Image (tube, helix red, strand yellow):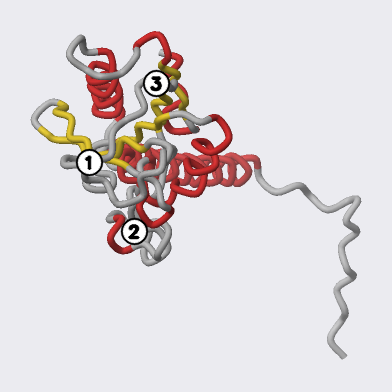
Amino acid sequence: PKPQTPNPDPKTSPAPPRSNLIMLDYLLCESFQKVFFLFTVLFGILALLIIKFQDLIVYVPSFGDMLMRSMNANSFGYRTPLDRGLPYKDVYIKSGKDTLHGWLIYPAKGDKEGKEGSQMVNDLPTVVFFHENAGNIGIRLGYLEAYIMRVECNVLIVGYRGYSHSEGQPSEKNLQQDSLAILDYVFDKQSSFDREKVTLHGRPLAAAVNVR
């Protein structure tokens, strides 16, 4: 019979050659460097894409069928202030090369025939409402109606560039320019606003602009 070779004792087995351990360490280090390099490249590409398309990510004038850009696509009650019996007039303000559109809404003083012939109530305070992100100015009508009824004031709301029926594309720079253009319109010497009774109200997107 063939003699059996005894199993080696792990405690007394010779250690693998040092050259093999060095080679293994080298391979592991090289693999880690490749993975790290690949991760860095992918992260860099992602960061560049976010920077390039950040305006599309941050500013949301519309969102599928849930939030439409045009007020005409809203349901009744959110298309124009007249849906809620509030007199108003369309406002157009030049900002850069584009034109902004908005509404000047005022309390109904026995005049619910429509926007034609209705006049702003000059002895009341005026709130310049800088709306939040996503959707058109029409979806804010419920909030603005409560504002007007409880505070009894005029309300000016204007869509930023790319929002509602305003021209252009939204961006941080354009948002700042639009806000200044709206304020110039309100505080112009030729305007009918009582500049001593103007309040600025900014929701999340425009709050920083108001502070600035």
Quadrant in the picture for the C terminus = top left
Q: Reply above or below: 95 against 39.
A: above
Using the numbered discs, state the Cα–Cα distance from disc 2 to disc 1 in whole angstroms: 30 Å
First along the sequence among labels 3 and 2: 2
- Tell me the quarter of the picture where residue 174 sits: top left
Q: Reply above or below: 148 against 142.
A: above
Q: Which residue is mark 3?
A: 209
Q: Amino acid at mark 3?
A: Val
Specify whether residue 159 is in view. no
- Kindly indicate whether the residue at mark 1 contacts the one at mark 2 (C-beta within 8 angstroms): no
Instruction: Give how far across and how far down residue 161 sits, in percent.
Output: 23, 37
Question: Dot 1: what SS?
Answer: loop
Q: Amino acid at mark 2?
A: Met
Q: Which residue is mark 2?
A: 68
Nearer the observer: mark 3 or 1; the answer is: 1
- Identify the residue at horizontal 29%, vertical 28% (top origin): 175
Identify the disc placed on residue 117: 1
Q: Reply above or below: 49 against 212.
A: below
First along the sequence among labels 3 and 1: 1
- Kindly indicate whether the residue at mark 1 contacts the one at mark 3 (C-beta within 8 angstroms): no
Q: Amino acid at mark 1?
A: Gly
Instruction: Give how far across and how far down residue 101 sits, in percent.
Output: 22, 39
Q: Residues within 10 Å of mark 1 (few under 14, many from 20)?
A: few
Identify the disc placed on residue 13: none
